[in-house]
Image (spheres, grey):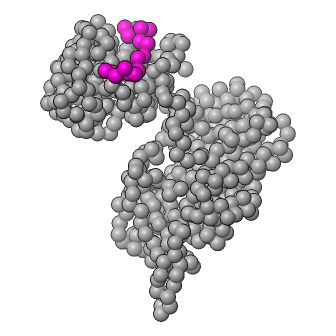
């Protein structure tokens, strides 16, 4: 792939956001750790240096090897990158007397600069630093300042090298997208050819060449990623794709039947396997969240393996891996600490000896949806909220029984259907109900009850890495609560979770 943008990652929490903003300009980009720069830079038309939690003044500060980049490729240095270029090229970086974090305004913008085309003075930018550039590097030309930061942006004379102290990738930088467009499109002249249609066309051709006449097995989940991967593969190899959709007994109410019906209309070769009893048996008397996840993962491997072995001549395993998973595996500091295990067919045993194909490995979640839309997948399926691989098992705190699953399925159905009825579903990134391991006293009619408590959870997010609870209308919550208590036997109390991530997680286990 030509006409790409290379993003060198120094460990910033915002690096993925840079990539997403670049992709929104219909420009393909890749993230690589600063210490693993690709051997060949020929495919890249421009380079962006990310921010970092490090200080350039620290002994362990990241040092990228830029001799093949500076002066050879248009270069944009963001935050740490801007400080790095100054500190090691004749300028100086010092501790700031005022730690500037959050919104600021560009009080001065040098006129006539292509880099700041269509960006007005006093525009909002987002700062996040404790050091400041006290002196520009050799041949540096100041382009913008804020009240507290003299050198908020600069360029280096004689090069297509630009540097900014603020973050254009975050939402709070009002003209951040315009700035990236000015650099990438107007200065670096990167063609805007990265579109869903182009991705589908090139990916299908690549899959045909990669797989040939081989047979592929894919574990469908009913979610967006595996569905889009299946349709891409179906376009490429047709009847040689074999999809397996496992009912682990922990899906939403009627989901197994509904999803199978949806897939039938897509022309996919899908086999539905109802293994509910097998999963419930594997979870018997298990309360620990991590052991529940592992029990479900092991049971899935066994069921999937049983079904895959009934197929002959299969030599490929397809997975719905997406780009954030790839980035995480090659991050600056290596894979991050595991907060919780993930349920994924990547854990299939070695003896299956299948080659891996991952059609979506270079896409972000929002791009997966756009590709799905391009291929005509039902908008209702593409707009489905994320649902955890272990299903309702991690929304039932404590041990799992078929009765608890029944209760939570009924509660969840009332909540989700209520969101759709009130036209709130598409305004929420993820919603679900949690069955708590406590009973509470209640009164129904003239009788005392001692029944289950359920918590409702609804969050807004873009990628699940951070999330805010949704301020649902009181009237909606009142209606849903009444319906749950009146219609679901075994529940007499409903609460609403108003925790954000961080410090809480979206799921409770």
The residue under the point 83% across, 44% down is 309
Residue 378 placement, left or right of 423 = right
Can you tell which quarter of the image residue 205 is in?
top right
Magenta stretch?
56-71
Q: Is residue 249 above or below residue 308?
A: below
The residue under the point 40% across, 49% down is 502
The residue under the point 32% across, 39% down is 171
Q: Is residue 68 magenta?
A: yes
Residue 45 placement, left or right of 177 = right
Quadrant location, the N terminus: top right
Most extreme residue toward the top is 158
Most extreme residue toward the front is 59
The residue under the point 42% across, 62% down is 497
Prevailing SS of the magenta stretch = loop
Residue 13 visible in rendering? yes
Q: Position of residue 288 (x, y in %)?
A: 60, 57
Q: Is residue 164 magenta?
A: no
């Amino acid at each position: 792939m030509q006409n790409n943008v290379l993003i060198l990652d120094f460990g910033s929490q915002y690096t993925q956001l840079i990539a997403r903003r670049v992709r929104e300009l219909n420009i393909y980009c890749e993230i690589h750790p600063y210490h693993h720069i690709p051997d060949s830079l020929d495919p890249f038309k421009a380079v962006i240096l990310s921010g970092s939690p490090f200080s350039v003044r620290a002994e362990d500060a990241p040092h990228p090897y830029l001799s093949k980049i500076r002066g050879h490729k248009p270069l944009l240095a963001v935050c740490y990158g801007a400080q790095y270029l100054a500190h090691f090229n004749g300028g100086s970086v010092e501790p700031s007397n005022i730690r500037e974090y959050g919104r600021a305004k560009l009080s001065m913008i040098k006129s006539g600069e292509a880099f700041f085309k269509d960006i007005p003075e006093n525009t909002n930018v987002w700062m996040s630093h404790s050091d400041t550039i006290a002196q520009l590097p050799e041949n540096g030309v100041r382009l913008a300042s804020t009240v507290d930061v003299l050198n908020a942006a600069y360029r280096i004379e004689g090069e297509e090298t630009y540097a900014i102290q603020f973050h254009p990738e975050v939402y709070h930088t009002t003209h951040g997208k315009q700035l990236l467009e000015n650099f990438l499109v107007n200065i670096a002249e990167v063609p805007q050819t990265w579109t869903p249609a182009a991705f589908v066309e090139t990916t299908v051709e690549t899959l045909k060449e990669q797989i040939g006449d081989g047979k592929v097995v894919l574990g469908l989940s009913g979610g967006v990623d595996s569905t889009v991967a299946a349709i891409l593969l179906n376009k490429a190899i047709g009847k040689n794709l074999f999809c397996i959709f496992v009912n682990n007994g922990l899906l939403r109410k009627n989901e197994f039947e509904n999803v199978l019906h949806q897939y039938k209309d897509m022309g996919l070769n899908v086999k539905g396997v109802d293994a509910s009893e097998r999963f419930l048996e594997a979870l018997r008397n298990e309360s620990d969240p991590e052991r529940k996840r592992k029990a479900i993962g092991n049971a899935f491997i066994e069921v999937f393996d049983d079904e895959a072995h009934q197929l002959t001549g299969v030599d490929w395993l397809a997975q719905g891996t997406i780009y954030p998973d790839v980035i995480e595996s090659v991050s600056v500091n290596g894979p991050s600490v595991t907060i919780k295990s993930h349920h994924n067919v990547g854990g299939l045993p070695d003896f299956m000896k299948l080659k891996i194909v991952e059609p979506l490995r270079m896409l972000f979640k929002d791009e997966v949806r756009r590709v799905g839309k391009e291929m005509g997948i039902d908008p209702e399926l593409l707009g489905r909220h994320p649902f955890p691989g272990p299903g309702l098992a991690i929304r039932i705190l404590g041990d799992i029984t078929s009765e608890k699953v029944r209760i939570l399925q009924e509660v969840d159905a009332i909540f989700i259907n209520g969101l759709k009825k009130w036209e709130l579903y598409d305004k929420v990134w993820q919603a679900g109900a949690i069955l708590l391991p406590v009973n509470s006293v209640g009164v129904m009619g003239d009788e005392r009850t001692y029944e289950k408590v359920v918590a409702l959870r609804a969050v807004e997010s873009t990628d699940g890495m951070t999330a805010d609870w949704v301020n649902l209308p009181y009237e909606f919550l009142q209606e849903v609560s009444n319906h749950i208590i009146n219609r679901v036997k075994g529940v007499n109390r409903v609460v609403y979770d108003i925790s954000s991530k961080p410090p809480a997680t979206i799921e409770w286990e």
